Image (cartoon, helix red, strand yellow):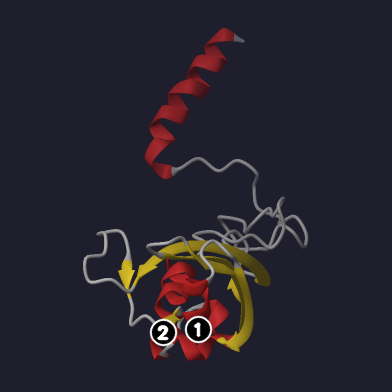
Amino acid sequence: MKLQVEQAKEHIGKKFPYSYTMPSVELGSDVVAFPWSRHDITISGEFWFDGQNYIVQGSIESKGDYDCSRCLKTTEHERNDSFEEIYSDRRDAEDDATPFNGEEIDLTELIRDTLIINEPSQVLCQDDCKGLCVHCGANLNVSPCSCESFVVDPRFAELRALLDEKDDRLS
């Protein structure tokens, strides 16, 4: 995705809006492993020339089919990630400015990096997802399982025996 910026240099401070919808595969073949790579993404925002640099702000709307972190159910998760970048066509550009050729700014790498960096570490199918039973693997959102509700970790069995013995003496 490329922004044509020639006219922005003529109108210092004037904001130019942009909006694109594109298949995420246009971001490169290295994104196919991400859940959002099978869906279109929408990029919108604005850019302007501040007298020295071009400022590009925007947001990326995407969605993907993620596995719930608790129950493993596949769920569609919508994302809205934002970005801001400074571009310069000058040779003596500041360190925080990304260089470009002066005619068009290619946002492909910025969009790809923003999506990857903001990839969620956990996605839940619902806020109150109960997850899976740690013993039998039943989905607790569907129905409760028939496992014993309190199972002592075998590593703590001796400690449990001491506590039970103490309870017996007190009664």
Q: Mark 2 falls on what kind of element?
A: loop
Determine the image quadrant of residue 117: bottom left
Residue 96 shows in this picture: yes
Q: Is residue 82 found left or right of 96 in the rendered image?
A: right
Of all residues, the one furthest to the left in this rendering is 92
Q: Picture coordinates of residue 26 (x, y %)?
A: 49, 90
Residue 103 - label:
2
| Image point (62%, 76%), residue name | 18
The residue identified by callout 1 is: 4
Q: Are marks 1 and 2 in contact (CB under 8 Å)?
A: yes
Q: Is residue 48 found left or right of 105 in the rendered image?
A: right
Q: Picture coordinates of residue 82 (x, y %)?
A: 55, 62
Residue 62 shows in this picture: no
Q: Sequence order check: which comes first, mark 1 or mark 2?
A: 1
Q: Picture coordinates of residue 33 (x, y %)?
A: 45, 82
- Nearer-the-camera pick, 107 or 103: 103
At label 2, the amino acid type is Glu
- Alpha carbon distance from label 1 to label 2: 6 Å
| Image point (62%, 59%), residue name | 132
At label 1, the amino acid type is Gln
Of all residues, the one furthest to the front in this rendering is 10
- Nearer-the-camera pick, 73 or 116: 116
